[in-house]
Image (spheres, helix red, strand yellow):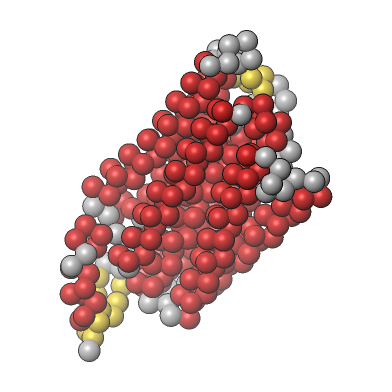
C-alpha cells in the first residue's frame, strides 16, 4: 500500500506542477524544450499508472517492454510532429524561441 | 466444480475450467485480471494513440485555428479533473490491494467510483461552458477532434463505472483486477490527453 500511496503522491505533484506552469503567463522555456518536458512528464505519469496502479511490474518483461515502446513511440511521434510543424512555419514559430507555458 | 488455492495474493477460488482457460491465453495470462479484458484494453490503447497522433497532425495543418480554439479550453478544469482521476485510480488500486489481502475493499472501490462520477460532472461543466460560448462539435476541426477524443474517453468512463459497479457486487480477486485494469487504462489515457489536447501549444 505504501508503494501505491507514493505513486499517487508523485502523480498529484506532477499534475499540480503542470497546472501551476500552465497558469503562469511568463516565458519559462524555449518552445522545443517546453514541448519535450510536457511530453516526458506525461509519459512518466502514464508509466507510473501502468507499473504501480495496474501492477505491470508483476507481468512478464515482454509486456513491460511493449507498453514502454507504446509510450515512447506515441510521445516521440507527437514531439516529431510538433517540431516539423514549427520548422515549417519560419517567422511564426522558432524551435528555440521562448514560448509562454500555458 | 472449483478448488481453493492460497497464493501470495491471499485465498482465491479457482474454478477448474478457469485455470485451464487461462493457460490457453499465452502471454496474456501473465497480466492481472481476465485476458479477454486485456484484448479490449490493448485495442483501446491503440485507438486512443491514433486519435492523439491524428490530433497533432491536424494541428500541424491548421496551426492558427488550433491555437485560437485551444485558448478557449479551461486548462484549470482539465487539471482538476486529472487530479480527480489519478486519485480515483489510486483508490481502485488500493481496493484491489485490500481484496488480495482479504481486507475491506468495497469502501475504496466505491470512493474511486464516486470520483469517477465527479470527473464526469466536471467534464459536463467544461462542455457547458464551451456550449455557452457558442462552440460545438461543428465549429472547426479543433473542436470536432476535441469533442470526439474527450467525449469518447468520457463514454469509456461511463462504461468503466458500470464495470466497477458490477465488480462491487461480484468482488472476486479476478473480477476486481479485471475491472481495475480497465479503469487504470482510462486513467493512463487521460494523463496523455491532458497535456496533448490542453497544454501543448
| B68 is higher (above) or lower (below) than A9 | above
**Can you see residue A82?**
yes
Q: Position of residue A76 (x, y in %)?
A: 41, 30
In the drawing, does residue B73 fall left or right of residue B115? Answer: right
Count how many numbered circles sit on residues in the image: 0
Q: Quadrant of residue A55?
A: bottom left
Quarter of the rendering occupied by the C terminus of chain A = top right
Q: Residue furthest top?
A: A91
In the drawing, does residue B73 fall left or right of residue B90? Answer: right
In the drawing, does residue A50 fall left or right of residue B124? Answer: left
Q: Position of residue B199 (x, y in %)?
A: 61, 35
In depth, the one of B124 and B166 nearer the eye is B124
In the drawing, does residue A6 fall left or right of residue A73? Answer: right
- What residue do we see at 51% from left, 65% from top? B160
- What residue do we see at 67% from left, 22% from top? A100
**Can you see residue B108?**
no
| A92 is higher (above) or lower (below) than B119 | above
Q: Position of residue A21 (x, y in %)?
A: 64, 31
In depth, the one of B28 and B88 nearer the eye is B28
| B196 is higher (above) or lower (below) than B178 | above
Q: Position of residue B105 (x, y in %)?
A: 47, 72
Quarter of the rendering occupied by the N terminus of chain A = bottom left
Q: Residue furthest bottom?
A: B1
- What residue do we see at 51% from left, 25% from top? A82
- What residue do we see at 55% from left, 27% from top? B60
Q: Quadrant of residue B161?
A: bottom right
Amino acid at each position: 500500500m505504501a508503494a501505491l500511496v507514493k505513486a499517487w503522491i508523485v502523480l498529484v505533484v506532477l499534475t499540480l506542477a503542470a497546472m501551476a506552469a500552465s497558469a503562469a503567463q511568463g516565458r519559462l522555456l524555449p518552445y522545443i524544450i517546453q514541448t519535450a518536458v510536457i511530453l516526458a512528464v506525461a509519459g512518466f505519469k502514464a508509466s507510473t499508472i501502468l507499473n504501480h496502479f495496474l501492477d505491470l511490474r508483476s507481468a512478464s518483461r515482454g509486456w513491460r517492454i511493449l507498453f514502454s515502446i507504446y509510450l515512447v513511440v506515441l510521445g516521440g511521434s507527437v514531439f516529431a510532429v510538433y517540431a516539423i510543424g514549427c520548422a515549417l512555419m519560419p517567422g511564426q514559430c522558432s524551435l528555440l524561441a521562448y514560448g509562454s507555458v500555458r | 466444480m472449483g478448488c481453493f488455492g492460497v497464493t501470495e495474493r491471499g485465498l482465491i477460488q479457482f474454478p477448474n475450467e478457469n485455470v485451464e482457460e487461462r493457460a490457453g491465453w499465452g502471454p496474456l495470462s501473465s497480466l492481472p485480471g481476465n485476458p479477454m479484458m486485456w484484448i479490449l484494453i490493448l485495442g483501446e490503447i491503440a485507438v486512443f494513440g491514433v486519435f492523439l497522433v491524428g490530433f497533432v497532425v491536424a494541428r500541424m495543418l491548421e496551426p492558427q485555428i488550433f491555437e485560437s480554439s485551444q485558448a478557449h479550453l479551461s486548462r484549470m478544469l482539465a487539471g482538476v479533473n486529472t487530479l480527480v482521476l489519478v486519485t480515483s485510480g489510486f483508490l481502485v488500486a488500493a481496493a484491489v490491494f485490500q481484496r488480495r489481502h482479504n481486507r475491506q475493499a468495497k469502501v475504496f472501490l466505491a470512493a474511486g467510483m464516486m470520483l469517477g462520477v465527479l470527473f464526469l460532472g466536471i467534464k459536463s461543466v467544461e462542455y457547458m461552458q464551451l456550449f455557452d460560448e457558442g462552440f460545438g462539435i461543428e465549429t472547426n476541426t479543433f473542436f470536432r477532434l476535441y469533442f470526439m477524443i474527450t467525449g469518447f474517453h468520457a463514454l469509456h468512463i461511463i462504461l468503466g463505472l458500470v464495470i466497477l459497479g458490477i465488480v462491487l457486487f461480484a468482488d472476486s480477486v479476478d473480477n476486481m483486477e479485471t475491472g481495475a485494469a480497465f479503469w487504470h487504462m482510462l486513467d493512463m489515457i487521460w494523463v496523455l490527453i491532458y497535456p496533448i489536447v490542453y497544454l501543448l501549444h
